Image (cartoon, grey):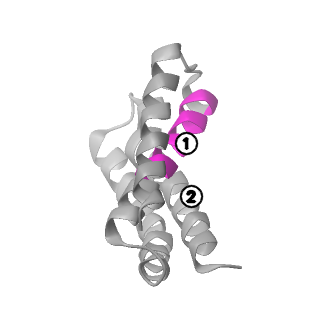
Amino acid sequence: MSGTLKFILLLTVSNVFMNFAWYGHLKFKGSPLWLAILASWGLALFEYTFMVPGNRIGAMHLSLTQMKIAQECITLAVFVVFAYLMFGETLRWNHLAAFACLLAAVAFTFAFK
């Protein structure tokens, strides 16, 4: 498996944990804030156990800018699935247009090494 693919896979897993840490508690608005914070911090630990090695692997194959642009796209892709499955949110045309702009940013970032 290539280093770039490992980077993408590790950041994808990291982002799953990130979305649960950042937004999952919104499904339980009645729970105490301290519990939401504690649960989010606990999930963030798992996020970092995938993100840190992913970024270290990615840094051996990509520039920092390429990694950041790729990370933003991974974050959005994971968030779209998360928002749909957890909250029933659907994509609208403007969401797709914004995502297309980010994909264009990825193309520009990787096209001219």
User: Is residue 82 in view from this perspective?
Assistant: yes
Residue 98 higher or lower than 8, as above or below: above
78 or 70, nearer to the observer: 70
Residues under labels 2 and 1: Cα distance? 9 Å
Under mark 2, the amino acid is Thr
Where residue 9 appears, x then y in whole percent? 61, 65
Where residue 105 appears, x then y in whole percent? 40, 45
Residue at left offset 57%, top offset 38%: 82
Q: Tell me the residue that label 1 is attached to.
A: 77
Q: Tell me the residue that label 2 is attached to.
A: 12
- Furthest toward the front, the residue is 112
Where residue 5 appears, x then y in whole percent? 63, 70
Q: Secondary structure at mark 1?
A: helix
90 or 60, nearer to the observer: 60
Under mark 1, the amino acid is Ala
Left or right of 32 on screen, residue 74: right
Check if residue 82 falls in the magenta segment.
Answer: yes
- Furthest toward the left, the residue is 34
Q: Residues within 10 Å of mark 1 (few under 14, many from 20)?
A: some
108 or 92, nearer to the observer: 108
Residue 58 higher or lower than 38, as above or below: below
Residue at left offset 41%, top offset 68%: 113
User: Which of the 4 quarters of the picture holds residue 28?
Assistant: top left
